[in-house]
Image (spheres, helix red, strand yellow):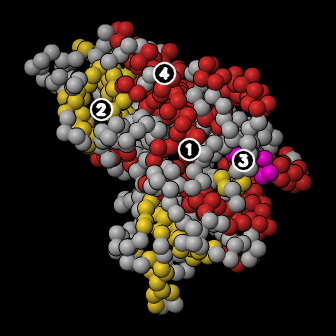
Amino acid sequence: MTSHYEVIVIGAGVAGIYQIKRLADLGVEATVLEAGGDLGGTWYWNRYPGARFDSESYTYGYSFSRELLDEWRWKEKFSGQPENLRYLNHVADKFGLRKYMQFNCRVDAARYDEARNLWHVQVSDGRALTCRFLVLTLGLLSIPTLPRLEGMGSFKGRSFHTFHWPHEPVDMAGKRVAVVGTGATGIQVIGEIADKVGELTVFQRRPNWSAPLNNGPISDADMADLRRRYDEIFATCARTPGGFEHEPDRRGFYEVSREERLALWDELYDGPGFGIWLANFREIFTDEKANAEFSEYIADRIRRRVKDPAVAEKLIPRDHGFGVQRVPMETNYFEAYNRPNVHLIDLGETPLVRETETGLRTTEDGGERDYEFDIIVYATGFDAITGAFDKIDIEGVGGMKLADKWRTTISTFLGMMVHGFPNLLMPSGPQSGSASTNYPRGIETGVNWCTDFLEHVWAKGYTRFEATEAVEKRWTDHVTGMYAMMLMRRAKSWFTGYNSNVPGHEQGTIRYLVYNGGSPKYVGIINSVAAKGYEGVTLGASAPPGNPPHSYGEVSR
């Protein structure tokens, strides 16, 4: 079995599949190492009820193959997990990509060997592999986090994080089910299972803003029209800040009357997907007064949908405005609370303190209360964006650990390189254009840029590259500065690195993880870097055996 490759790609999700497609087309000796039992990334792991796109299906699929676009038929405007996984398997099979993939291969460590100018990759099955170039296509939301409760693991019934939802069907009929968490995943699960379980108890720490997905089928006629318009659709995605079809309203918030604003909001609320968020006035992201007015509009829509006024008020966020963090899209979520079998527990009033053998325990009125369940579902989020990187012991020049470098502050060059870690690329890394956009649109940009860069390296005969410390600082300062314009800078969300279940990521720590300048600006910047011969990246030949570290024949671009 091969132990050395020119390129090793880690992760066989949406980004890894496209990355190996590009490398295979070039005839590069490459492989993909995937921890899971098959390809698909987020759509392989997240099999919980209600899991589906919040991007329009036809804007989520790959754009690189006209034949693929013409032959694949999306069934729903916002496709569900089973179809999404079938799609990714179809892509891999159509282009013969499985032969490059190795499954059940968790990468434990990756160490850069300065003397040999190679990466040493340690795999969970005991193998030690080497490669010249290491490409990390790790999932941004792929490391689930559980609450830090006493007694975790003591429950005698079935319990699991939504990320690890069993592959076999879970019988919930007549069962007492708990859902802990009302973020994007919890909102999807609750809306889907409320009418399928015996009793559903929702434990909510903080409510999240949410708006209707307004999903529906795609008819044959609609699909034919979409195929005719694919070029137009992808062109629209390319010019919008978020990489979606939804373009912001160019009118000024205060240039139109209150009545005109309400008319737009009514239209967007009843429309599909992220329109309510991304086709809105731009001021809702930057102006506190504008955001407050719009947030109150959404609050009123919630009150109209939830029959019990007290429950409605508990479902309305008070600590942040609508849209300052990624907006969960829902189907029948608020209506679930009108059902007699659905109960909302406000953890702000009665904190959750323990998992017990029979269920969960809260504090209440100076005492404790035990809730008994058959199934506990933890929808408690992820160690977002950097979590998957931290799970691998990545060591660069001089023994520097990536986890240590990123412990308190994130720094990258373009979100795709890291100073001190030569020959390492991240097409969808922290501070890249992927996390804050329609993900496949962002990863195609990142994979194409990284692959074009590698072609440049090979064409010029270089064997080593590294971003300089100066350009990394300049990019990180730029990313940080973009946060200053946005209301999200104060949000408790994974956009700011907040996660109360991860030590060091609690309230009061801000990590600048995403690029807020919009996709067109990001693409313009990275294309400019390429056009200038990859300015800021030191390119050179590797040191001959026995030479001291850093004695490379370097050519600073």
- The residues bearing labels 2 and 3 have C-alpha atoms spaced at a distance of 44 Å
265 vs 223, nearest the viewer:
223
Q: Amino acid at mark 4?
A: Phe
Instruction: Name the mark on residue 82.
Output: 1
| Quarter of the rendering occupied by the C terminus | top left
Q: Is residue 53 magenta?
A: no
Residue occupying the far left of the picture:
546
- How dense is the environment of label 1, judged by Cα within 10 Å: few (below 14), some, or many (20 and up)? some
Residue appearing at x 71%, y 35% in the figure: 245
Q: Earlier in the sequence, mark 1 or mark 3?
A: 1
| Quarter of the rendering occupied by the N terminus | top left
Residue labelled with disc 4:
95
Q: Amino acid at mark 3?
A: Asn
Instruction: Name the mark on residue 215.
Output: 3
Q: Is residue 271 magenta?
A: yes
- How dense is the environment of label 3, judged by Cα within 10 Å: few (below 14), some, or many (20 and up)? some
Dot 4: element: loop
Q: Earlier in the sequence, mark 2 or mark 3?
A: 3
Residue labelled with disc 2:
421
Dot 3: element: loop
Q: Which residues are magenta?
A: 269-274
Residue 317 position in % (x across, y down): 64, 66
214 vs 131, nearest the viewer:
214
Q: Amino acid at mark 2?
A: Phe
Q: Is residue 81 left or right of residue 235?
A: left
Q: Are marks 1 and 2 in contact (CB under 8 Å)?
A: no
Dot 1: element: helix
527 vs 166, nearest the viewer:
166
